[in-house]
Amino acid sequence: MHEHRTDGAELIFLQDGGAIPNNPRLPVLLHRGAVPEGQPEAAESLFRSHGWRPAWRNGIHDWHHYHSNAHEALAIVSGAVRVQLGGEAGVQVDLHAGDVVVLPAGTGHRNLGAGVRLLVVGAYPEGAAPPDQLHGAPEESERARHAIAAVADPARDPVTGGAYPLR
């Protein structure tokens, strides 16, 4: 299900994907054109100003994975990528330079194809635990669902600084 917030961000609600639990309460946020193209420092500064800690610059793994103990923001600084959110039965989204996607704990994500220029800045809320990396193995399921439920909601949207999620 897709909705739009008053600030123009798209909300994507994902159902439990079985092997990939997703988040039962919080939607994925998609902000189009939120950061300047080719300027990773600008994305990092924006995240920092709203209480999110920039943690890495790289790409997106080409296999389904998720973080059960942390929310994650991904800024596409250059290039473009098609991602699948939510596991095998999830949605496919095309992201371009300037876009930011905010993934609540438990949200599966996978790179389905990217250009050679793809550069992503990843960030996590201040005070978050170092993110685990799970793949949807059956033995992860129960522990992951408990961890997802225990993660506090982000204090602020990493792009707008407003409440997350604001409908």
Image (spheres, rainbow, N blue to C red):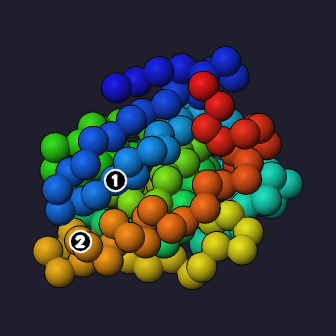
Residue 128 rendering spot, x and y as whole percentages: 64, 73
Q: Would residue 89 appear left or right of 127 to someone viewing this image?
A: left
Give the residue furthest to the right: 49
Q: Which residue is mark 1?
A: 22
* Figure check: 155 above or below 131: above
* Figure check: 82 above or below 128: above
Q: Quarter of the image containing the N terminus? A: top left
Q: How many marks?
A: 2
Q: Which mark is residue 32?
A: none
Distance CA(mark 1)–CA(mark 2): 11 Å
Q: Which mark is residue 141?
A: 2
Q: What residue is at 68 percent from the left and 64 percent from the top? A: 125
Kind of residue at disc 2: Ser
Residue 48 rendering spot, x and y as whole percentages: 80, 60
Mark 1 or mark 2, which has the lower sequence index?
Answer: 1
Q: Secondary structure at mark 2?
A: helix
- Is residue 9 among the parts visible in the rendering? yes
Q: Nearer the viewer, residue 53 or 146?
A: 146
Q: Quadrant of residue 119?
A: bottom right
Q: What residue is at 69 percent from the left and 22 percent from the top? A: 7
Q: Nearer the viewer, residue 110 or 124?
A: 124
Residue 20 rendering spot, x and y as whole percentages: 24, 59
Q: Quarter of the image containing the C terminus? A: top right
- Is residue 35 among the parts visible in the rendering? no
Residue 59 rendering spot, x and y as whole percentages: 46, 63
Q: What residue is at 65 percent from the left and 42 percent from the top? A: 164
Tell me the crowding category of disc 2: few under 14, some 14 to 19, or many 20 or more residues within 10 angstroms, Cα based.
some
Kind of residue at disc 1: Asn
